Amino acid sequence: MINKVILVGNVGQDPEVKVMQSGSKVVNFSLATSETWKDKNGEKRDSTEWHRIVVYGDRLPDIIGQYVKKGTKLYVEGSIKSRKYTDASGNERTITEIVLQNYSGTVKILDSKSGSSDNRSINSAEDGSSHKEQIASQDHSGHIDDDIPF
């Protein structure tokens, strides 16, 4: 079975990093994904979906808190999870979230504040028994590999 979600969208508010009772960290933020189309009358229509993103880890939430801000365009890869909770009025609610945890998931910054063609990748990956988060900066502008046959 596969539970994998890939989203590209804009962050709705600055990420909020919290420390749980166990000492591990979690970061929450919303991500807006939009689509645009023309209806049968030729009028432009659009629709925006809001997704709640939750990232668990030791360092990854801090990295996201440092580099990701409201309006940042992100690529997010995680799994979809639903959970129930009781609100302040005593009503049981269900919430659906995109979760990055257990050494899985990816966040890529697709734009930067400086306006450069800088892409940053923040990955949660397993390396033996260690948990690592990476930020890699890549700039391939103007680079052409003439050895590629196609």
Image (cartoon, rainbow, N blue to C red):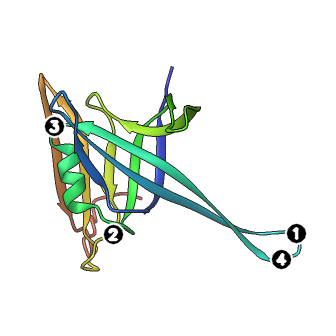
Q: Which residue is disc 1 drawn over?
A: 40
Please name the residue shown 25% across and 69% down the image.
118
Quadrant occupied by the C terminus: bottom left
Who comes first in sequence, dot 2 or dot 4? Answer: 4
Q: Is residue 148 left or right of residue 7?
A: left
Among numbered discs 2 and 1, the one appearing first in the sequence? 1
Disc 3 marks which residue?
A: 58
**Can you tell which quarter of the image residue 146 is in?**
bottom left
Q: Residue 53 in the image: x percent, y percent?
A: 41, 46
Residue under circle 2? Answer: 111
**Residue type, label 4:** Gly
Depth check: 84 or 55 in front? 84
Kind of residue at badge 1: Lys
10 Å crowding of disc 4: few (<14), some (14-19), many (20+): few
Residue drawn 18% across and 52% down?
A: 63
Name the residue: 15% across, 43% down: 59
Q: Tell me the SS state at disc 2.
A: loop
Viewer-proximal residue among 142 and 83: 83
113 left or right, relative to 128: right
| Residue extending furthest toward the right | 41
Report which quarter residue 79 is drawn in.
top left
Front: mark 2 or 3: 3
Mark 4 lies on a secondary structure that is loop
With respect to residue 99, does 46 lie above or below?
below
Q: CA distance from mark 3 to mark 1?
A: 50 Å
Q: Are marks 2 and 3 in contact (CB under 8 Å)?
A: no
> Compared with residue 106, is residue 1 higher up or lower down, i.e. above or below?
above
